[in-house]
Image: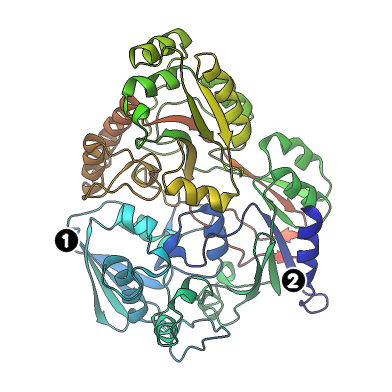
Amino acid sequence: MKKTLGLCMLALVAAAPAKAAVLSVCIEGSPEVFNPQLTSNGTTSYVLGQIYDGLVSVKAGSSDIQPALAESWTVSDDGRTYTFKLRRGVKWQSGEKFTPTRDFNADDVMFTFERMMKPDHPYAKVNGGNFITFSTKLADTLESVEKIDDHTVAFTLKKPLAPFIGIMAHQSLAITSAEYADALSKAGTPELLDREPIGTGPFRLEAYQQDAAIRLAPFEATWGAAINDPARTPMLDAVILAISADASVRLQRAMAGECQIALYPNLADRQMIEESPNLDLVQTPVASTGFITFNFREEKFKDKRVREALAHAINMKPLVDLVYDGMGTVTGAVIPPSLWGHDKDLGAHEYNPELAKKLLAEAGFPDGFSTELWAVPVSRPYMPNGRRAAEMIQADWAKIGVTAEVVSYEWGEYITRARAGEAQVGMFGGIYDFPDPSQIPNNYFTCDSSGKPSPSNIGAWCDPEFIGLMNEAGAVTDQAKRIELYKKAQEELHAEVPAVILGGADTITAVAKNVKGYVPAIFGTSRLSGVTVE
């Protein structure tokens, strides 16, 4: 596999001009899709974050929301209407099948959101129409989007939503081109909108070899360069995103100089990076939560006693210490310790195998049962080593008579299958894209008003009490009241045990010493604009 990747890298780099400033980044997986609306996957967001812009963004290395395609915004006195003034003179990228004839304007914002809002929109069902972030955060709250003029758009909510501006910074709500979509529709190829991206960001897609590498070229006319913002200006002649699923392989390639940035190396390899003469260890505080979730489509997992038994059977302290390499925290709270709203008094379920056996017997499984335990195949702050964690859980469950087969797939397939409801016990998790506690609870543990689970709610747990508390917390602006409601929601999740919280840790990145200007994002997507290679 390493040899194949190397050959693909050479093929993609060969097109670069002599002595070009080429940055190679070793990433852990292929993008699911090339449209941000259809994903909440971190790997995909990292790629698309170089190509697309949203109305607002999170400033690199901080939690501050800053203008992007919107220069400014105002909020009505009742907290329901947000009016955005759009940036003028923003250019769209070109592609083999499209050359723009106009700049970014309100029509693009309208197209982007109407595609997600209106079931009868021509693009609503294209490529599945699974708008993950919109469905979980805005679908039940957003009343209308109105074009006031070419450079003004108003969003009206059914009720106030405290984290609205933060939500708008999510990469999955980046703006897509209405003119490009119209051209593709007329050509009879609307599906290409999500496969051949056209954005306004600092880089454009030049080539992609699936499961091997992605080549990005600088978009010289990007608006960041036009306003002389170094952090939004491409400083490189090319970016190669080399795909290596194995964290050890990514680090080896960085050590060998094959890539200048290696994402998500194993936490246990910190010392190796620190001792390298060519690499710097960059540690970034991130808010993330990992967990295993029980599939409520399975009859046995509908019985709370079964879920409680499996939770009590896991010896959490050694698991967290080993898997998170001493950087994790044992907790039963779905909101991580690094965010306000975390319930520090909510501990993990007590390790008690005898109680677990008793609960299983009461539920009709005195001899245990067999199940699948899915392990994430990539390294993430919320789960640095999914295989190791799964094997430790597997061993703990064996002590109470539960046989767990550890299952995994390539990351893109894993996500697709898990979201299709195939995981009996699924390992999953998320990294906060904006500094508000609502994101992960809403993404992974809620259902819409019709009872349909959010796309990342792979266990299909729909609890009215939990959903009601989350909705109420999102509708008030008083932070103390929101904290109170979020704590109640966390207590409800802990009591009902739809999942077992595993934790999260800071992320580390291996960065070559000759790379300057790379600032990993605390929230959202790390951008490669402003980065140079000496």
Residue 285 in picture, x, y percent from top left:
55, 42
| Cα–Cα span, label 2 and label 1 | 53 Å
**Pointer 1 local density, CA inside 10 Å: few below 14, some 14–19, many at least 20:** few
Q: Are marks 2 and 1 in contact (CB under 8 Å)?
A: no
* Kind of residue sitting beneath label 1: Asp
Q: Quadrant of residue 47?
A: bottom right
Counting residues from the N terminus, which is met first, the one under dot 2 or under dot 1? 2
Q: Residues within 10 Å of mark 2 (few under 14, many from 20)?
A: many
Give the residue drawn at x 57%, y 39%: 506
Q: Which residue is mark 2?
A: 12
Considering depth in this image, is 252 or 312 the residue closer to the camera?
A: 312
Please tell me which residue is depicted at 54% across the width and 13% down the height of the picture.
399
Q: Please give the name of the residue rendered at 43% of the width and 11% of the height, measured from the top-left corner.
A: 357
Which quadrant of the figure has residue 396? top right
Taking 52 as reference, is 498 above or below it? above
Give the label, 2 or 1, closer to the camera: 2
| Secondary structure at numbered mark 2 | helix
Q: Is residue 56 visible?
A: yes
Mark 1 secondary-structure assignment: loop
Q: Tell me the kind of residue under disc 2.
A: Leu
Measured as percent of width and height from the top left, residue 234 is found at 62, 72
- Residue 443 is situated, as x and y percent measured from the top left of the image, at 37, 47
Is 164 placed above or below 504 here? below
Q: Position of residue 365 (x, y in %)?
A: 40, 16
Figure quadrant of the C terminus: bottom right
- Circle 1 is placed at which residue position? 77
Frontmost residue, 391 versus 89: 391
Residue 66 seen in the figure: no
